Amino acid sequence: MKLSEEQIAFYDVAKNFAIEKMAPHAEKWDEEKILPVETLQELAQLGFAGIYVSPDLGGSGLSRLDSTLIFEGLSQGCTSTAAFLSIHNMATWMIDNFGNQELKERFVPDLCSMKKISSYCLTEPGAGSDAGGLRTKAEKSGDHYILNGTKSFISGGGFSDVYVTMVKTDQNSISTLVIEKDSEGLSFGGQEKKMGWNSQPTAQVIFEDCKVPVENLIGQEGDGFKIAMMGLDGGRLNIAACSLGTAQSAYERAVQYVGEREQFGKKLQEFQALQFKLADMCTELEASRLILREAATKVDNNTSDKTKAAAMAKRFVTDAGFNIVNEALQIHGGYGYLKDYPLERNLRDLRVHQILEGTNEIMRVIIAREILKENK
């Protein structure tokens, strides 16, 4: 797929920022579990905190394809931080795309500047990939909703200012609310101890008779499932892009390493077994790039098969990305296993991409369902 000069520029700006301002600090952010707010605000100044949000409210008004290019570039500096920014973008887009004008004007400008940070709350302790099985309830009482329930594995939990939350407003109806951090009845669990994604805080978000103004409803009651699914189409593209960029950086390190390292009196690059590994890694990167950009184009064009395309891209690219990083680590031998090199962190950070935004097993369910639907 041929990119425009402007799209190439988006990618270059993101990648250069990642290499210069994220990569040198990524190890510290991971080890000390630091969310680099100042760095995120610098990214907001580049227009990367409201990538596909209306320019009238401070967004960049770009496409989903543009977004994948940006996250592919950013993840080459710090996978975890890039992925956190992806989630912020998804939550901000939901308010901008589905909220009324008053709600948008109240929240979106501060989110686009990252004066405020947003989180997306769907997953629950008993409802992970089963989005329709959530149990958090919101009952209307006068001019407020009263919420009870718990959300799990929330990136930004306890830290973010705004929580875009899926709730049940009746037995069969899911709705979306914007919940502010200082809301009465809102609390947070302890920070989760994770394998990766350590530059972003993760915690349960707990609602105990939590009061939320009715004007914080996004769209209409009952729109929540549609909003969640549309958000996940884009979220899956961005997470795939983060896997792709991380895999690209790992592959480049592997190519450099085999050209420098010697064993048995010759460079590693002279061994055919390693040449074959590099050939497969390069092929999988190119295939990932093609399927991801094609899927992003379908989401941009709102084609009938956009959900299938996004699921296919997420499944393929996150699996391929993890395998490529694993091979790059293997090529580095014992050095790849050391924290002095970024590969072990890359591997830890990418592993969760095969789980979140719907597990890759669920991606297969979605793809198969869409195939069979097409054949009816």
Image (cartoon, helix red, strand yellow):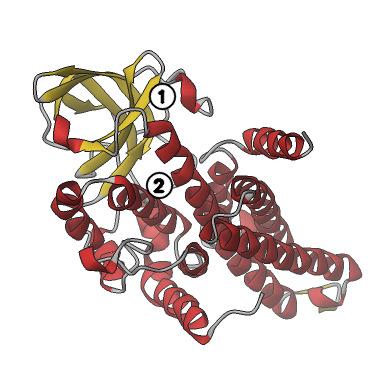
Nearer the observer, 273 or 41: 41
Rendered residue at 25%/72% (across/down): 45
- Amino acid on which disc 1 is placed: Glu
Give the structural element (helix, strand or loop) at label 2.
loop
Residue lying farthest front? 376
> Which numbered disc covers residue 198?
2
Q: In the drawing, does residue 357 fall left or right of residue 184? A: right
Q: Quadrant of residue 86?
A: bottom left
> Which numbered disc covers residue 124?
1
- Amino acid on which disc 2 is placed: Asn
Q: Earlier in the sequence, mark 1 or mark 2?
A: 1
> Which numbered disc covers residue 225?
none
Rendered position, 36 above or below 220:
below
Residue lying farthest right? 272
Rendered position, 12 above or below 39:
below
The quarter of the image holding the C terminus is: top right
| Percent x, y of residue 175 | 33, 29
| Percent x, y of residue 188 | 24, 28
